[in-house]
Amino acid sequence: MNNTNLKDLLYEYQKKRDFAELKARELKKEIYSKNNRLEEIDSQLAKFSIDTAKSLLSNNSKELLGQLNLKIATLKNEKKTILKNMGISENDLLPKYECSICKDTGYIQSGYNTKMCACLEQRLFDLEYNSSNVYNMHNHTFENFNSSYYSDTPDKEKYGSNISPRQNIEIIKKLSLNFINNFDNIEEKNLLFTGNSGLGKTFLSSCIANSLLKKGKTVLYQTAPIMLDSIINFKLRKIYIQYQYLWTIAKRRFAYNRWFGNWKHE
């Protein structure tokens, strides 16, 4: 998972959440301005709720708790009636989040456990997918893998193997699936596909990439020349940064020695 993508998405979610809550507050303010009793009811509800909590902590009598609960229920019914007469339901006053499950937080709280909401998982997947260069190969999946395209006739002289091309590709498919299932295992070896054009190397590597994306892994699908250029550019940039750092240190030392009169010209 790309942490930068997650950070950007969480910021986007926060803005959506803030906007929904702002609109809800504005609507509530507009409605309450038409009937001052609504604000009075909210204030009383808040006070009685605090009193109820205090009573529970103080182990007060059930009779007192019953009276408080009755007052709260009465006020809620009054509020509901006022809103109904205005053609408004209590739900209309709630923020209109894009995702009603996580309320645009991206996460779902279940007891002491927190898990990522399906909406955020999907957004992450879409971002990873679009940045992986696999987006134009979405049909390249193992579900669409068809070994019948390959000959079922062995020909050692032609293929350099005692098994048929179909048997060979089935073995490669099995190795590829094993690679995906054990992707997090550091002992798992990498895969290298070689051969002439038109043998299915691109299709198979795209199948692997799509499968890993579905598992929430970060994938970069790139051609060898571009990948090698990226590695070379990264190395050169790293060398340049180190050079800049050393040159900065050298200049600072030169300035320090000259300032304190210790610099000597030889």
Image (cartoon, helix red, strand yellow):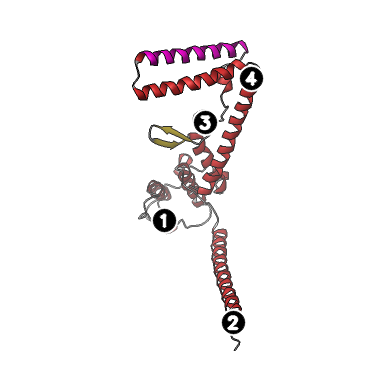
Residue 19 visible (yes or no): yes
> Residue 190, which numbered label?
1
Give the residue displayed 53% in from the left and 55% down from the top: 197
Q: Earlier in the sequence, mark 2 or mark 4?
A: 4
According to the image, label 3 marks what residue? 103
Task: Look at label 3 and name its amino acid.
Answer: Lys
Give whichever of 229, 76 is nearer the camera.
76
Cα separation, mark 2 vs mark 4, equals 76 Å
Residues tagged 2 and 3 counted as in contact (Cβ below 8 A): no
Label 1 close to label 2 by CB (< 8 Å): no
Can residue 199 be seen from the camera position used here? no
Instruction: Assess disc 1: are there few (<14), some (14-19) or many (≥20) residues with their C-alpha within 10 Å of its C-alpha.
Output: few
Mark 4 falls on what kind of element? Answer: helix
Which sits earlier in the primary sequence, circle 1 or circle 3?
3
- Name the residue that disc number 2 marks: 261
Indicate the quadrant where residue 58 lies: top left
Magenta run includes residue 265: no
Distance from disc 1 to disc 4, alpha carbons, whole Å, reads 63 Å
Q: Residues within 10 Å of mark 4 (few under 14, many from 20)?
A: some
Say which residue label 4 marks. 31
Instruction: Measure the C-alpha gap from mark 2 to mark 3.
Output: 66 Å
Q: Which region shows up in magenta?
A: 63-86
Instruction: Tell me the SS state at disc 2.
Output: loop
Q: Is residue 148 above or below residue 247?
A: above
Among numbered discs 3 and 4, the one appearing first in the sequence: 4
- Classified by dominant secondary structure, the portion drawn in magenta counts as helix
